[in-house]
Structure formats: C-alpha cells, structure tokens
Image: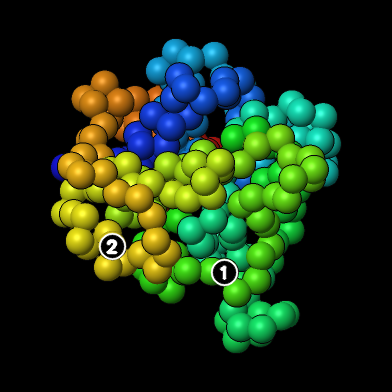
Amino acid sequence: MIHPEERLAAALARLILDPAAPPARHIAVGAASPIPAAACWLVRKSGHPVRLSLLHKRSGNPFTEGTRELFDLTGQGRIDLFFLGGGQIDGQANINLVGTGEWPGTEARFPGSFGSAFMYMMTPRTILFREEHSPRVLVPRVDNISAPGLSAPGVFRRGTAQALVTGRAVFRFDPARGRFALESAHPGEDAASIRAATGFDYDEPAHLPATPDPAPEQLALLRGPVRDEMLETYPEFCARVFGAAEKKDAAA
C-alpha cells in the first residue's frame, strides 16, 4: 500500500527536479516539514548532488544560529528552493500566515508570517505545500497577505511560486499571468472534486492526468535510506508512514 505522504513526497521530488525550472543546487526546508524533507532526501538519495539545509534537523544541523543563518544565505542568493504553506492561499499565490478577518486577523489566528515574505521574495523557486485542500484554505483572496505571490513592476524579487501541492492535487503557477493551472489529481479525485474543493479559479486541461504513484525504486528509497535519515528528527512521522521506531541508546 502506498501512503498519501509517500505520493506527496514523490510529487514534490518531481517538481524539485523539473528540468524546465532553474537548478535546485541548495534546498532549504523549514521547521516541522516532514513531507518536503522526505522529498528532498528522496532527490538526494536518488543520486542528485543537491545540498540540503534542514532547519529542524536534530543532529548534524548546518545552522548554528538557526533562521538568522538561513535568512543570510537566502539574502546572498545561496538558497535555490524553499517550501512555504499558509493558513490561506489564493489564486495569485498569496499566502496568509497571520489570521482571518480584518487586520490584524483576530477571527482565527495562524502561526505568524515570521520570515515567509523574505524567503518568498528572495528565493528563486518556492513550492507551496498544504495537505488540507478545502475552500477555507484555498480561497478567492487571502484575508491578509503575509507573503505576496506577485510584486509590482520595479520591486526586486528573485522568484515566485513554482507550484502548489496539496492533499488532492498538483497545480503549476504562471507568474506572468498570476494564475494557477491544475496539473494532476491524486487518486480518488477528479476535475469536478478538485473544482468543488478549491475556492479560487484556475485553468484546467481538457484531460486531467492522475498524479503518478511513486516508482518501486522510489518507495524502496523512502522506506529505507530516506526513513533512516529522517528517523531522529521526525520519529512520529516515520512511525506513522514508514512503520519505523526510533532506535534507542543500547545503554539506556
């Protein structure tokens, strides 16, 4: 049986390796992002020479001062790809991590935007990721823009969203048009179910492909070397998805 998380990791890995996109030589993953982390390790374990900086990694973490170093690297143009999510995401790839309702968004509070606006503006490629795919998350217009998907002419930014991956589908983003296009639907979904669950408008192909399952060799990597890399940092995720338990110190 293929777990949904494994399918999402494989979908993200395909986007990372997209030959039409700028190369992803150095990828950063923020805290509490096990599925993007699994995708990055899948790319690495597949033989692609990418550098991974995982902010949440417990041991062997390249950061000694956490996010400050991540922001410094990004400002210097040394991070090629990052992942962002949002409590709300709209059809122009704006994200809201502040809250719903009028500013300051006190109806429903989200975790906070932190450095999302800076990372979005300064990273050449951003993949938006949110497992929940519903009209309350994918909205016509976010209540508060904590990180803009597009910028006015003359405003410097290195990149925009490349894609949006959810628990139901994969969308591509066209920054020239400021619009998403539905690329594939995950098993159990179709064009009608995706449309019903999405609050913003988007383009749709005449024939909607299904999101591919991970190849057997990808599953072997996810359930073996990738799991082993992630076990210390994401033990609950590895136990739930891969059925792996964290190894205990033999002297304990």
Foreground pick, 188 / 149:
149
Residue 146 seen in this snapshot: yes
Q: Nearer the viewer, residue 218 or 147?
A: 147
The N terminus lies in which quarter of the figure?
Answer: top left
Does residue 29 appear anywhere in the picture? Answer: no
Q: Residue furthest bottom?
A: 107
Mark 1 neighbour class, 10 Å CA radius: few under 14, some 14 to 19, many 20 or more: many
Residue identified by numbered label 1: 142
Q: Residues within 10 Å of mark 2 (few under 14, many from 20)?
A: some
Provide residue 204's location: percent of width, then percent of height. Answer: 29, 49
- Ranked by sequence position, the earlier of labels 2 and 1 is 1
For the residue pair 158 and 82, the one nearer the viewer reads as: 158
The disc labelled 1 sits on which kind of residue? Val
Which quadrant of the figure has residue 125?
top right
Identify which amino acid the numbered label 2 is placed on.
Arg
Tell me the tag on residue 243.
Answer: none
Q: Is residue 236 above or below residue 15?
A: below
Q: Is residue 131 above or below residue 64?
A: below
Image point 59% across, 60% down: which residue?
Answer: 95
Kindly indicate whether the residue at mark 1 contacts the one at mark 2 (C-beta within 8 angstroms).
no
Under circle 2, the secondary element is helix
Q: Residue at x 18, y 42 (%)?
A: 207
Vertical comparison of 88 with 184: above or below: below
Say what secondary structure mark 1 lies in. loop
State whether residue 108 is above or below residue 97.
Answer: below
Left or right: where 83 falls relative to 173 = right
Residue 242, position as x, y percentages in the image: 31, 42
Label 2: which residue? 195
Residue in the image at 48% along x and 58% along y:
91
Task: Name the image quarter holding residue 86.
Answer: bottom right
Residue appearing at x 58%, y 50% in the figure: 84
Estimate the x, y position of residue 121 in percent, counting from the top left. Answer: 71, 44
